[in-house]
Image: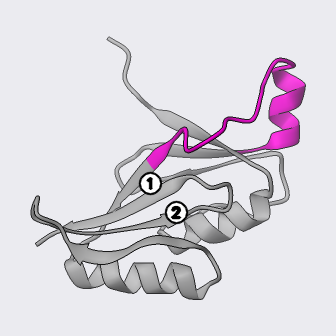
Amino acid sequence: MPSLDAFGIVCADIAKSVKFYNLLGLDFPDAGDDHIEATAKNGMRVMLDKLELIKQIDKDWVTPVGRPMGLAFRCDSPKEVDATYAQVTNAGFRGKTEPFDAFWGQRYATVFDPDGNAVDLFAEL
């Protein structure tokens, strides 16, 4: 059976995306290429691709509207959710939902990456 190994994110500005995702613990190399990858702590590969590259590969590609993708990053503690949210928003990235204690038993917050993808931060209470 196939297993999920990697996922890609199309970026209008790959340097901004590298800065954003580095704040969330992904270790991307310098943003000089059209395609770069980082491996998350759990082994999943995260690929960033420049919009121009995707348009060369797929002539029919159309920029999605709305929020076609959501990501969630597990934090080690509720305090780390708060600290990560503050770090990301203080770095100039947009917050959506400030940290709160959710009824489902998690500390939860949401920020947007540079391309408008919702990125959740969570930890068990």
Q: Position of residue 30 (x, y in %)?
A: 76, 65
Q: Front-most of 89 and 15? A: 89
122 sits left or right of 26 in the view? left
Q: Position of residue 55 (x, y in %)?
A: 86, 30
Tag 1: residue type? Ala
Looking at the rendering, the stretch of residues picked out in magenta corresponds to: 49-70
Seen in the picture, residue 86 relative to 93 is either above or below; the reply is: below
Disc 1 on helix, strand or loop? loop
Q: Could you say which disc has been placed on residue 73 in the image? A: none
Q: Front-most of 98 and 54? A: 98
Seen in the picture, residue 24 relative to 33 is either above or below; the reply is: below
* 59 falls in the magenta region: yes
Q: Position of residue 53 (x, y in %)?
A: 85, 36
Instruction: From the image, tell me which residue sits under label 1.
Output: 40
Query: Which quadrant of the figure contains the C terminus?
Result: bottom left
Q: Do residues under tags 2 and 1 come within 8 Å of each other at their CB atoms?
A: yes
Q: Residue at x 87, y 19 (%)?
A: 59
The residue sitting at the top extreme is 1
* 61 falls in the magenta region: yes
Q: Residues within 10 Å of mark 1 (few under 14, many from 20)?
A: some
Seen in the picture, residue 71 relative to 113 is either above or below; the reply is: above
Q: Earlier in the sequence, mark 2 or mark 1?
A: 2
Query: Which quadrant of the figure contains the N terminus?
Result: top left
Q: Residues within 10 Å of mark 2 (few under 14, many from 20)?
A: some
Tag 2: residue type? Leu
